[in-house]
Amino acid sequence: MGKYDNIDFTKEIPFIRKRCPHLNEEELQEAEELFREYIRLCLKIYEGKERRAKEDSLTEN
């Protein structure tokens, strides 16, 4: 993911655990992993947009 490689995706995600006390540990881990996948996808899209904006600014000059 480029500049976001230093993000630690192995830590627990407190807000999921706080908002979903009814889930058991396995379900919490699955919910956290789904959230991590969503964040990875968002960062990938964001980096693509940053890269295209940078390329566009280079071609305009």
Image (cartoon, rainbow, N blue to C red):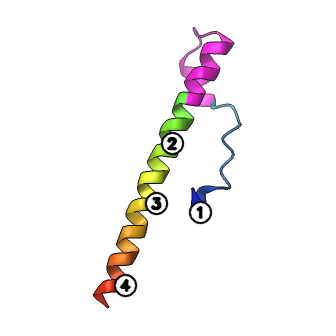
Kindly identify the amino acid type of the residue bearing the numbered disc 3: Glu
Q: Which sits earlier in the primary sequence, circle 2 or circle 1?
A: 1
Kindly report the distance in space between the C-alpha atoms of the residues bearing marks 2 and 1. Answer: 14 Å
Task: Tell me the residue that label 2 is attached to.
Answer: 39
Mark 3 residue crowding within 10 angstroms, few (<14) / some (14–19) / many (20+): some
The disc labelled 1 sits on which kind of residue?
Answer: Lys
Q: Looking at the picture, which amino acid does disc 2 mark?
A: Ile
Instruction: Give the distance between the C-alpha atoms of the residues marked 4 and 1, in whole angstroms.
Output: 20 Å
Badge 2 marks a residue whose secondary structure is: helix
What is the C-alpha distance between the residues marked 3 and 4? 16 Å
* Residue 58: assigned label: 4
Residue behind mark 3: 47
Tag 1 residue? 3
Indicate the quadrant containing the C terminus: top left, top right, bottom left or bottom right: bottom left
Q: Quadrant of residue 57?
A: bottom left
The reply to whether callout 3 and callout 1 are in contact (CB within 8 Å) is yes
Q: Secondary structure at mark 4?
A: helix
Report how far apart the C-alphas of labels 4 and 2 lie in the structure.
28 Å
Q: Is residue 29 above or below residue 38?
A: above
